[in-house]
Image: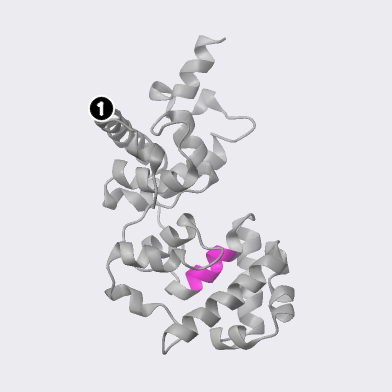
Amino acid sequence: MENQTLNKVTEEQIEKDKANARWLYQALLEKYGLPTWRTPLPAIDELISTILSQNTNDHNRDIAFNRLRAAFPTWEEVRDADVEKIIAAIRPAGLENQKGKRIKTVLQQISQEHAQLDLDFLTDWDREKVRGYLLQFKGVGMKTAAIVMQFSLGMPAFPVDTHIYRVTGRFGIRPENMNVEECHLYMESLFSPDQYEAGHLNIIRLGREICQARKPHCEICPLQERCNFFRRLVENS
């Protein structure tokens, strides 16, 4: 993967960002504690669930996923179903036409390449080979691949969603011009693998509750002390 912005980051900047990432991790740990992911799903279930989660909230994703499993109890049945029936089942997740076609295509592709319709074989693969395999599917980007890796396969990866991208940019532990795809690998370089899960979940929580897109509640944020956004806010007030 080409990472032109990442390649331009100096060693000095990386070390500074690592130190601030460690501080951020500890500050959020003190604020929120050690979070845990929802009940882990098998990798193929997580893959489909994460495709459904794109551009919607967790509630709508879960409704769509449960409706899909109720209509088609096995992934083989989803694979072989008429795409219109898949679309109807997952409508609560939004973008159902796009997601329905992608889900069917992903399941067909896995079936063509492997004897069983699951992703259990990935547990024996090298981490970067797994990432590359997941990224080959249309509609699967770095975030989806990282979620499957970290939370289903137990392979260290740092998923970056819109909240994490916003918080890390405002706080200042990544170059402002770094894109979302590059941000995944940069976060993996700043945090240690044992910090990926809690770091990911706590930053998302901060983004949802405090560092919101339109109206951040900087006055109650635990990251004020080192936050670039807050410092600029104070300087301009």
User: Is residue 39 visible in the rendered structure shown here?
Assistant: no
Quadrant of the rendered structure where residue 88 is? bottom right
Identify the residue under disc 1.
12
For the residue pair 75 and 132, the one nearer the viewer reads as: 132
- For label 1, count other residues whose C-alpha is less than 10 Å away and answer few (under 14), some (14-19) or many (20+): few
Q: Which residues are magenta?
A: 45-51
Query: What sort of colour scheme is used for the picture?
Result: one colour
Q: Is residue 20 left or right of residue 106?
A: left
Q: Position of residue 96 (x, y in %)?
A: 70, 67
Q: Position of residue 130 (x, y in %)?
A: 35, 67
- Whether the magenta-drawn stretch holds residue 47 is answered as yes
- Whether the magenta-drawn stretch holds residue 65 is answered as no
- Quadrant containing the C terminus is top right
Q: Residue at x 37, y 49 (%)?
A: 198
User: Is residue 103 visible in the rendered structure shown here?
Assistant: yes
Quadrant of the rendered structure where residue 147 is? bottom left
Q: Residue at x 48, y 42 (%)?
A: 164
The chief SS type of the magenta part is helix
For the residue pair 197 and 12, the one nearer the viewer reads as: 12
For the residue pair 176 and 41, the one nearer the viewer reads as: 176
Q: Is residue 80 left or right of residue 26?
A: right
Q: Residue at x 44, y 81 (%)?
A: 118
